[in-house]
Image (spheres, rainbow, N blue to C red):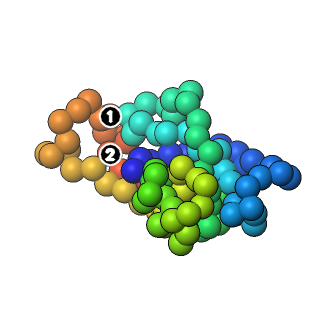
Amino acid sequence: MFIGKVVGSLWATRKTENTKGVKFLIVQPYNLNKEPNTDTIVAADTLGAGEGELVMVAYGRAARVAVGNEDMTIEAAIIGIIDEYEVDPGHYHGDLEPSRQSYKKQ
């Protein structure tokens, strides 16, 4: 599981039968201390996430369980929309900037 930022939507008129009706979003994995990296993934979204939001993304079987269909032909799914996070600097052993130790959705 990782944190990502929704950067766009994806539409496909032709896709496998078991993904019809599923909304897909383009997500960039997010490093708390840096800008999002340049890699992107496509994730199924059953929660209604929007562009610019921070989300939690699951991979593989966990993603399929989250959308309620273990046979669905997806590899990633948004499993949460992040409202807020806080990192305890006493337990974090990296170089996280103080301005990024917490986040609250506006």
SS under mark 2 = loop
Residue 13 place in picture, x, y as percent = 85, 52
Residue 69 place in picture, x, y as percent = 55, 69
Inter-mark Cα distance, 1 to 2: 7 Å
Quarter of image, res 31:
top left
Q: Is residue 4 left or right of residue 23?
A: left
Q: Residues within 10 Å of mark 1 (few under 14, many from 20)?
A: few
Q: Residue at x 18, y 36 (%)?
A: 93
Q: Quick check: can you spot residue 54?
A: no
Q: Which mark is residue 23?
A: none
Q: Which mark is residue 97?
A: 1
Q: Residue at x 70, y 60 (%)?
A: 19
Quarter of image, res 42:
top right
Residue 38 place in picture, x, y as percent = 56, 27
Circle 2: residue type: Gln
**Residue at the extreme left of the image, as rendered:** 90
Q: Which residue is mark 2?
A: 101
Residue 16 place in picture, x, y as percent = 73, 55
Circle 1: residue type: Glu
Q: Residue at x 66, y 57 (%)?
A: 50
Q: Is residue 49 left or right of residue 62?
A: right
Q: In the picture, which quadrant includes the C terminus?
A: bottom right
Q: Is residue 43 above or below residue 62?
A: above
**In the foreground, 48 or 87:** 48
